Amino acid sequence: MEELSEQGIKAARYDKFLIMDSDGSHNPIYIPDIYKKFVKGADVVIGSRYVKGGKTNDSKVSIIMSHILNFVFRIITGIKAKDISTDFRMYDTKQLKAVKLTCQNYDILQEVLLKMKINNRKLVVKETPIVFEKRLYGESKRQLFKFILGYVKTLFMLIGVRINASFNKNRQK
């Protein structure tokens, strides 16, 4: 699954919501580790390429772009996770359903985290190491120029969301 969809979230019936790529790049052997971290007190657990023990088999250019993207999103969201751009995650379904989404592509991942954090200031995000494999099935739908433009647009949208949330919080005091 390359993106979360509102339909999938609305249809969720259990207290945990797991997403992962269906192209073979996310190995299901890591699901038990993600689950164990989740039940030990997390609202979100990320299967991370960039924590100790994690690894990615992407190209060097993709790795550099990913590190830059994750750095920028850590600043904007205020979430200290090292791999904010991956979609191998387990969420608390109730908190996930409380988020109103506007993004349509890969950038939805960061929108979800920021809005969950706005709704729950004590949001607990944990990471567990995974090995991100090269795609086994299908072809990437990502077009580099559109991908970059989409993320730039999302950066500004998320900055606005965070400023608006801060403004509303201060007004309520």
Image (tube, helix red, strand yellow):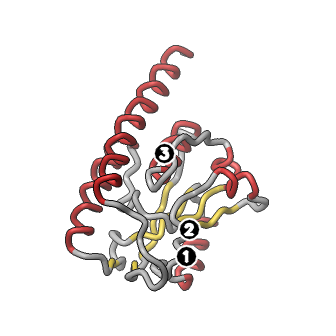
Of helix, strand and loop, which one carries label 3?
Answer: helix
Q: How many angstroms separate mark 2 from mark 3 (CA)? A: 17 Å
Q: Are marks 2 and 3 in contact (CB under 8 Å)?
A: no
For marks 1 and 2 on the same chain, the one whose residue lies earlier in the sequence:
2
Q: Is residue 2 above or below residue 155?
A: below
**Helix, strand or loop status at disc 2:** loop
The residue located at (61%, 39%) in the rendering is 100
Q: Are marks 1 and 2 in contact (CB under 8 Å)?
A: yes
Tag 3 or tag 2, which sits nearer the N-term?
A: 2
Residue type at mark 3: give it: Glu
| Residue 86, horizontal then vertical, whole percent | 43, 64
For image coordinates 41% across by 26% down, the residue present is 163
Q: Amino acid at mark 2?
A: Met
Give the residue type at disc 1. Ser
Residue 13 lies, with reference to residue 77, above or below; the image says below
Image quadrant occupied by the N terminus: bottom right
Q: Sequence-wise, which precedes: disc 1 or disc 3?
A: 1
Q: Tell me residue 28's x, y (percent).
A: 56, 82
Residue 111 tag number: 3
What residue do we see at 50% from left, 78% from top? 23
Q: Which residue is mark 1?
A: 22
Say which quarter of the image contains residue 101: top right
Left or right, 92 with respect to 105, comes to right
Which disc is residue 39 wearing?
none
The image position of residue 149, as x and y in percent, is 32, 46
Give whichever of 170, 20 is nearer the camera.
20
Crowding near pointer 2: few (<14 within 10 Å), some, many (20+)?
few
Spatial CA span between label 1 and label 2: 5 Å
Q: Dot 2 corresponds to which residue?
A: 1
